[in-house]
Image (cartoon, grey):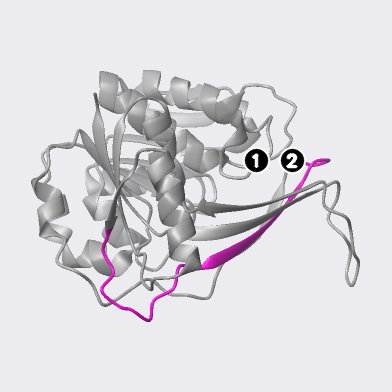
Amino acid sequence: MSRALFIGRSVLDVLALVDDFPGPDGKTKALANDLIPGGSSLNAAIVFSHLGGDATLATSMGAEGLVRNFVTDDLKKYGIDLRDICDDPSYHIPLSTVVSTRSLGTRMIVNGAQDDCSRLKDGRDLFASDYNLIQLDQYEHPFVGQNFDDIRAFDGPVILDGGSWKEWSPDFLRLADVPVVSEVFLPEGPHAFAEMCNDLGLSRWAITRGTNGVIWHDGGSSGEIPAIPVTAVDTLGAGDIFHGAFCHAYAESGEFVEALNSANRIAAKSCEFAGTRSWMRA
């Protein structure tokens, strides 16, 4: 069984699926509502576990209470080994508000105001375990900085989930062996990202582009993977699901392009269902 460590922020998503976004001062009736734990690494860890892997999630849980218990119980249900890295009792898991449209297959996200936890537990024991890979999602920046040397010394691939550019993105890129980023990660485009990776000595990378498919580069080879046509109901979490599926396939086979193809198929399937979990039950 493949094993992976996912490091990133956990949130509690308040979800609504609507036909169309309302205009200014407008109202609309939800087609579906849900309350579900989320976050890039949390979602990826659950997908990794769902596909048969052994996932550990290092994340900030903070204060005891209903939200923490809700998130913890959900992770237990999916067999995730949860490691709380936060030592600040005033930290609260952020609430994220997500509105998705059925007509367009797009969504609007309002992230919580809570910053990453900066009062941290000693997490060095995490890196003594025998993982096949580590995934970083650019959150829990203080924890990643505290353990920079241990992550760099990890004897295995470090995967970067790069959703959008942040002021600390260069720090995460310096830790990455395989960055798999979205097309909005670097607004200057794929060529600029390729040059950046070349400057950093990164020869294996990919850019996900939604309905335009995936661009990949692997040493002296490069190519594109076309998007799989689907009738999208909800694209929420598709990138996270892609990453969880990629990490599982890559940990199992070590085949980069094969893992990207597998992740592309699974992420496309997830878009045919509302929310981030219902595709698993289909």
Q: Residue at point 54% right, 22% down? A: 265
For the C terminus, the image quarter is: top right
Q: Which residues are magenta?
A: 84-104
Residue 203: x and y in percent read 27, 35
Q: Residue at point 38% right, 81% down? A: 90
Q: Which mark is residue 235?
A: 1
Find out whether residue 234 is within the magenta segment. Answer: no
Q: Relative to the observer, which residue lies in front, 213 or 81?
A: 81
Q: Residue at point 40% right, 54% down? A: 72
The amino acid type found where label 1 is placed reads Thr
Residue 221: x and y in percent read 34, 22
Q: Earlier in the sequence, mark 1 or mark 2?
A: 2
CB under 8 Å between callouts 1 and 2? yes
Q: Secondary structure at mark 1?
A: loop
Residue 27: x and y in percent read 90, 64
125 is higher (above) or lower (below) than 78 = below
Residue 252: x and y in percent read 27, 21
Residue ranking furthest to the bottom: 90
**Could you tell whether 32 is left or right of 172 in the image?**
right
Q: Residue at point 24% right, 27% down? A: 2
Q: Which mark is residue 105?
A: 2
**Could you tell whether 198 is left or right of 92 in the image?**
left
Magenta region, mostly helix, strand or loop?
loop
For the N terminus, the image quarter is: top left
The answer to whether one can see residue 55 in this image is yes
Find out whether residue 94 is within the magenta segment. Answer: yes
The amino acid type found where label 2 is placed reads Gly
Image quarter of residue 68: bottom left
